[in-house]
Image (cartoon, grey):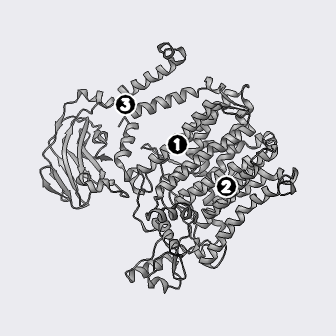
């Protein structure tokens, strides 16, 4: 046993482990070693600004936005750091700590320290820093002063009308030594990942031969999928804001389920008479004015039509999740669970789809490239834009994405089985069409992916005559029937609500603008295409090193936009592979994937333009079309990788692909932690800043 562990092949692992331990002990704990020379001194006597009242010996209350500071004088010593063990007393409130659906930014105090020193007789204002109750490292603030400091002032920026407890304020206090086991595992795993993907790595020799995965490869792939799903649930459920959001429009699916049990298609709420009497209830500013004058309100983001409230979101999530849950338990289905489950199932079907594509079309792909591409695909697919904010808006989009990927998997299997006259053709056709048709009951614009049936079944229909002919009447019927049934049901549902089989009700939404007059304006398209595909990300030297972009523009009309993190091509480099599709045109045509890839990219553009016209530029809408770009990109990567395997440029191609994947993964991980839309920084600052300072060990 020991001889196997000490095998030469394992020496690199021991070296990586040693490097990891050295980094953890010495580099990541440099503040502990630097503090060995400090001579600490507690500061107790302070004066307060006019905006601060002294409540007791160690408690103050911020009563005004001006002069909300405490000040220490006559320090007269060199200061290397200051330790602020302070907190908002709401941190001790068990009710606030345990309740779900609460933004917990009270756990974070924002303070601004000002100092005087040899170079600054007057106060020098330093950057604002967070002090987080359970993130001990945030309390140790490294100061870079010039000579002795006479005075220190601490301003409290986000604590108006709150009581602050001052447990202790100490200068030159040595930071404690900490061994972060999770950080050790992550650093060790990341270094092993980099080492295993070096150009000369023997892992590239382990191929998916003839498109068949070995048992070990299949098990590892399933473990990776499971790890992704677990992480998705951890990511969403550590953000308490969305566990049970107490926001009216986030209850719409539940209210619709209750209405269904009463035999009605409208919500069981009576609109205020002031809204009913309005000539144009969709005029946002006028509506707000009239509601205010009448001391009432209209339900936000609900469809309003002829005196009734409706739900304009796709109805399928209600039928699959909310209605059964309510009928069986009388309780509301948990939206955050449904969104996360949808994304987890999507991750599973993405692996199945990739495996089927490689099995049928690519005979010599390095397994490590296959799995690395898969991970990048999951992280950049748009699922995490939904998981950042797993609310009612994310539910129909995530379900539509899930059904699209599942539908493509079954269709792809069917198209290949038809060529080889294999068993199970009709089942795959029926399941594929059912999944793709049901997309219309979730997110109608994603139904564009159904046009991918054209390149998939073109040969079977027009050349081999194995579909839509006498050779397979049953298969032809099973291919079309799901669309007929779903379309019939939706058309009846729409007609019963809005008097038209093609009216889904989105235009009757009581939202930020009058959707009934929005129309189609070419002037919106350039901004939408630029933002969704080519907007550069904003970077800055503060965790997580990227920030939301500003989409201010000169479009002189009604359009809607919210902060995004950048365009698909600029943020996720693996998408660049679509630009070399033409280089692989000949071989991809032979494999029947060239037209499929081009059409998929075109459909992504169509969906992005439709989103821009119908609603605007919203971050969650990336999930509508991201995979339509990423899947062709993956196909292009597999083709270029297979072409050069074992050749002169094999190492160069592999290295380039891996670099693109690493950058894509790093940006994806950083994007999960950006401060926007009630992110972890606001809803769970204790966790967020422990992660942030575990990475920013130098602070």
Horizontal arrangement in the rendering, residue 170 relative to residue 281 (left or right): left
User: What is the spatial separation of the Cα atoms under label 2 and label 1, in whole angstroms?
Assistant: 25 Å
Residue under pointer 2: 604
Residue name at image x 52 percent, y 14 percent: 7
User: What is the spatial separation of the Cα atoms under label 3 and label 1, in whole angstroms?
Assistant: 27 Å
Quadrant of res 662:
top right
Q: Work out whether mark 2 precedes mark 1 in sequence or the reverse, and give the earlier one.
A: 1
Q: Nearer the viewer, mark 3 or mark 1?
A: 1
Q: Which residue appears farthest toward the top when viewing the image? A: 3
Element under disc 1: helix
Mark 2–mark 1 CB contact (< 8 Å): no
Residue under pointer 3: 28
Residue 96 horizontal/vertical position (percent):
29, 56
Q: Residues within 10 Å of mark 3 (few under 14, many from 20)?
A: many
User: What is the spatial separation of the Cα atoms under label 3 and label 2, in whole angstroms?
Assistant: 44 Å
In the rendered structure, find residue 228 and report the number of the disc placed on it: 1
Q: Work out whether mark 3 precedes mark 2 in sequence or the reverse, and give the earlier one.
A: 3
Residue 256 horizontal/vertical position (percent):
51, 70
Residue 380 horizontal/vertical position (percent):
57, 46
Quadrant of res 485:
bottom right
Element under disc 2: helix
């Amino acid at each position: 046993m020991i001889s196997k562990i000490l095998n030469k092949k394992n020496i690199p692992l021991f070296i990586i482990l040693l490097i990891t331990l050295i980094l953890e002990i010495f580099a990541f704990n440099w503040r502990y070693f630097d503090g060995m020379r400090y001579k600490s001194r507690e500061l107790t006597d302070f004066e307060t600004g006019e905006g601060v009242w002294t409540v007791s010996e160690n408690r103050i209350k911020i009563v005004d936005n001006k002069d909300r500071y405490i000040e220490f004088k006559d320090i007269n010593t060199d200061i290397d750091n200051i330790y602020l063990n302070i907190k908002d007393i709401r941190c001790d409130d068990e009710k606030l700590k345990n309740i779900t659906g609460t933004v917990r930014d009270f756990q974070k105090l924002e303070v601004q320290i000002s100092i005087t020193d040899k170079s600054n007789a007057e106060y020098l204002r330093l950057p604002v820093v967070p002090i987080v109750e359970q993130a001990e490292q945030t309390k140790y603030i490294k100061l870079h002063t010039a000579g002795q400091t006479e005075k220190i002032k601490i301003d409290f920026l986000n604590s108006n009308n709150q009581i602050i407890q001052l447990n202790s304020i100490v200068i030159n206090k040595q930071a404690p030594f900490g061994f972060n086991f999770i950080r050790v595992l992550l650093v060790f795993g990341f270094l092993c990942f980099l080492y295993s993907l070096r150009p000369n790595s023997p892992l590239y020799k382990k191929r998916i031969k003839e498109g068949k995965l070995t048992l070990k490869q299949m098990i590892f792939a399933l473990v990776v999928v499971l790890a992704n799903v677990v992480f998705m649930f951890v990511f969403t459920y550590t953000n308490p804001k969305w566990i049970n959001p107490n926001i009216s429009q986030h209850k719409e699916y539940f209210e619709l389920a209750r209405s269904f049990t009463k035999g009605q298609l409208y919500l069981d709420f009576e609109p205020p008479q002031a809204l009913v009497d309005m000539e144009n209830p969709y005029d946002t500013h006028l509506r707000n004015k009239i509601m205010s004058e009448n001391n009432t309100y209209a339900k936000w983001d609900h469809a309003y039509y002829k005196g009734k409230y409706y739900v304009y979101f796709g109805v399928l999530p209600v039928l699959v999740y909310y209605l059964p849950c309510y009928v069986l338990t009388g309780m509301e289905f948990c939206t955050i669970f449904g969104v996360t489950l949808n994304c987890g199932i999507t991750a599973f079907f993405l692996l199945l789809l990739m495996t089927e594509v490689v099995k049928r079309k690519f005979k010599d792909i390095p397994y490590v490239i296959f799995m690395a591409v898969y991970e990048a695909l999951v992280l950049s697919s748009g699922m995490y834009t939904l998981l950042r904010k797993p609310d009612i808006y994310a539910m129909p989009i995530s379900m539509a994405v899930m059904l699209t990927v599942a539908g493509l998997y079954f269709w792809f299997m069917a198209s290949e089985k038809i060529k080889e006259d294999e068993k199970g053709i009709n089942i795959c056709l029926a399941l594929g069409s059912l999944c793709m048709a049901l997309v219309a009951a979730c997110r109608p614009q994603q139904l564009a992916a159904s046009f991918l049936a054209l390149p998939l079944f073109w040969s079977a229909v027009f050349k081999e005559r194995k579909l839509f002919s006498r050779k397979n009447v049953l298969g032809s019927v099973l291919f079309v029937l799901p669309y007929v049934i779903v379309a019939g049901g939706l058309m009846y549902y729409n007609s019963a609500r809005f008097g038209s089989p093609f009216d889904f009700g989105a235009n009757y939404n009581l939202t930020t603008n009058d959707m009934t007059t929005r129309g189609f304006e070419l002037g919106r398209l350039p901004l939408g295409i630029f933002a969704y595909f080519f907007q550069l990300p904003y970077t800055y030297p503060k965790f997580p090193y990227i920030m939301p972009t500003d989409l201010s523009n000169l479009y002189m009309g009604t359009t809607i936009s919210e902060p995004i993190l950048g365009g698909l091509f600029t943020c996720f480099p693996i998408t660049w592979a679509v630009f070399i599709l033409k280089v692989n045109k000949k071989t991809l045509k032979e494999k029947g994937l060239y037209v499929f890839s081009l059409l998929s990219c075109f459909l992504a553009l169509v969906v992005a333009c439709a989103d821009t016209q119908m609603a605007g530029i919203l971050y969650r809408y990336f999930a509508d079309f991201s995979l339509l770009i990423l899947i062709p990109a993956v196909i292009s990567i597999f083709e270029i990788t297979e072409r050069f395997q074992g050749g002169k440029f094999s190492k160069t191609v592999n290295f380039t692909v891996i670099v693109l994947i690493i950058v894509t993964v790093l940006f994806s991980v950083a994007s999960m932690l950006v401060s926007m839309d009630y992110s972890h920084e606001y809803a769970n600052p204790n966790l967020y800043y422990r992660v942030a300072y575990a990475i920013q060990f130098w602070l």
